Image: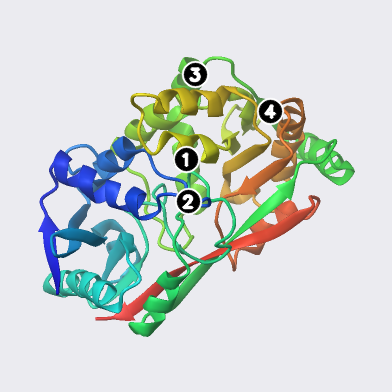
Amino acid sequence: MIEIRELAPTKANLKKFTQYQIDLYKGNPYFVPPLVSDDVATLSPDVNPAFDFCEAAYFMAFRDGKPVGRIAGILNNQVNEHHGTNDVRFGFVDFEDDPEVADALFKAVEDWGRAKGKNRIIGPLGFTDLDHEGMLVEGFEELSTMATIYNHPYYPAHMERMGYEKDSDWLEFLMEVPDGIPEKYDRIAEIVKKKFGLKVLKYKSRKKIKEEYGKALFHLINDAYDGLYQYSRLTDRQIDYYIDIYLGLLDLDLVTLIVDKDDNLVGVGISMPSMSRALQKSGGKLFPFGWYHLLKGLKGKNDRVDLLLVAVKPEFQNKGVNALLFQDLIPHYIRKGYRHAESNPEMETNGKVQSQWEYFTTRQHRRRRSFKKDI
């Protein structure tokens, strides 16, 4: 018999909730664990500023006292209000291949959402787009990334069995880093610079980039991504929170800012060395030796780079600004020995984004899906 327990969001409970996923995938060569401390912070109402407009409930399934599944229910009131929807989200979901477990977990979130007056459930989604989202439906034998969900092939089969339907898909691409800047990219970049008076900014100081463009960078993300599926605009408190988390980690050679003649930010490209192998070796923990593997992943030899984020101001989209970003970034990729580049998930309907890879040798290697169901 399956017992469902709702967990109070204490640090100890959130550690157990996060650790379940790591234990479930132990030994899986494709799964990349999160840092437990990062997920605990994300799930904690006392830490994550998304709780200014979100609510959450955390459920775990037990059989004979042993955990066999977990799931979060999330209400993003900002997105519901912005889009005129009445949804409850599910996320942070993992479970054994057992219909009884899956049914009990999803019933818990459906009942919770219904009690909150919601009429539809969607997911997997996090609190915002900076959290992991989308259930893997293709590419189960591809190494996952720090920024994406890995799940067993039986997950989507259970979703369909429970009456869930596709809401939207994301595609991911693996690209070969070219030996030089593609000639067309180079030509387009030079035209764009002259036509719009744009220039590339590079920084050597994290403190300086935070001070001069930290807030502008996240405001640009809000403007560039606002029309995308279920996008949750970042508040000023979230921006302050994420500036400290993200900008402190980056290799500034792999951060490219594009500004206009008045130094207003119009585009940004952010990459970082793949942390997949380092996180696997860390087991999701910084101590006692996880920090060493993560530092080695950031500073050591690595043949793969993750394209974390590309954002362009709406009025400059489809005008070649992306070529200017990669004209700057590709030489850094080559110098650092990267042979492959991972895209972040992109909406399958977003032809604008996918067109930026047309001058690279690419392989669409993963697909992930959000599901929906009326409740």
* Mark found first going from the N terminus, 4 or 2: 2
Q: Nearer the viewer, residue 15 or 331?
A: 15
**Can the viewer see residue 319 in this picture?**
no
Q: Residue at x 48, y 27 (%)?
A: 293
Residue 37 higher or lower than 112, as above or below? above
| Contact, mark 4 vs mark 1 (Cβ under 8 Å) | no
Report the disc number at residue 31: 2
Left or right of 78? Residue 252 is right
Left or right of 239? Residue 276 is right
| Measured Cα–Cα span from mark 4 to mark 2 | 36 Å
Left or right of 84? Residue 309 is right
Report the disc number at residue 200: 4
| Contact, mark 3 vs mark 1 (Cβ under 8 Å) | no
- Identify the amino acid type marked 1: Gln
Q: Nearer the viewer, mark 4 or mark 2?
A: 2
- Identify the amino acid type marked 3: Arg
